[in-house]
Image: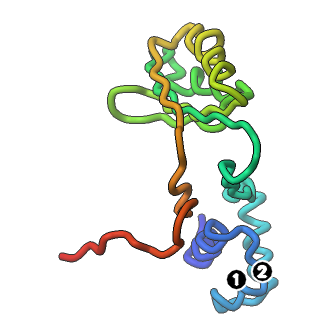
Amino acid sequence: MIDQFDLNILEVLTEDARTPVERIALMTGRTPQEVAEAIARMEEKKIIVRYPAMVNWEAVDMDLVEALIEVRVSPQRGEGFDAIAEQIYRFEEVSSVYLMSGAYDLMVLVRGKSLKQLALFVSEKLSTLEHVLSTATHFVLKRYKDNGVVLEGGQSDDRLAVSP
C-alpha cells in the first residue's frame, strides 16, 4: 500500500522523471535517503515501471505515423478481454492498448514509418485475429498537447477557469 508521501513522489516524477532525489526531498520534507528508498520500493513493486522521455516527433526530421484504432472484439470464455488484448499488444507496431467503455472494446495506439505500413498491420495482422469483429482506424495528423505538455505555441496555461 502506498501513502501520501509515495503519492507525492509519483506526482513529481510524473511531471519530470529527471527531478533529483534531493529536490524531491526538499519538496516532501523528507531526507534524500527516505526518498531514494521509497522510489526503490515502488520500482520493486512495479508501481514505477519506466522513466520515459517525451519527444515531440514533429520537431524531429523523421517519418513517423501514428494511428488510434478502435477494435470491437468478442471476449473469450474464461479470459474476457485480456487474452485478445495480450495478442494485440505483442505486435511491435503497438505502443498502447486500452480496454474502453462505449461503442468499441479496445483502443490500440500504433506507430509506424508510413501509412502503408500501418494499413498493412491492420489488414494483415490485427483484423485477421480470430476474436476481432471490426476495426476503425484514425490517423493522427498533428499533436497539439501530449500528456499535459503543449507541443506548439506558448506554454502558458490558457485553459478556461471553472467557477461554481
| Identity of the residue drawn at 55% across and 57% down | 147
Residue nearer the viewer, 145 or 47: 145
**Is disc 1 surrounded by few (<14), some (14 to 19) or many (20+) residues within 10 Å?**
some
Secondary-structure class at tag 2: helix
In the displayed structure, 138 sits above or below 53; it is: above
Instruction: Give the residue pinned by disc 2.
Output: 21
Q: Which disc is residue 33 wearing?
A: none
Residue nearer the viewer, 50 or 82: 50
| Position of the N terminus by quadrant | bottom right
| Identity of the residue drawn at 74% across and 50% down | 60
**Image quarter of residue 34:** bottom right
Q: Is residue 46 visible?
A: no
* Amino acid type of the residue tagged 2 in the rendering: Val
| Identity of the residue drawn at 76% across and 46% down | 61
Residue extending furthest left?
A: 164
**Image quarter of residue 5:** bottom right
Can you give x and y, in whole percent of width and height, for residue 38 in the image? 73, 73
Instruction: Give the residue pinned by disc 1.
Output: 24
* Amino acid type of the residue tagged 1 in the rendering: Ile
Q: Is residue 91 visible?
A: yes
| Position of the C terminus by quadrant | bottom left
Secondary-structure class at tag 1: helix
| Identity of the residue drawn at 76% across and 71% down | 18
**Image quarter of residue 30:** bottom right
In the displayed structure, 137 sits above or below 62; it is: above
- On screen, residue 32 versus residue 76, left or right, reads right
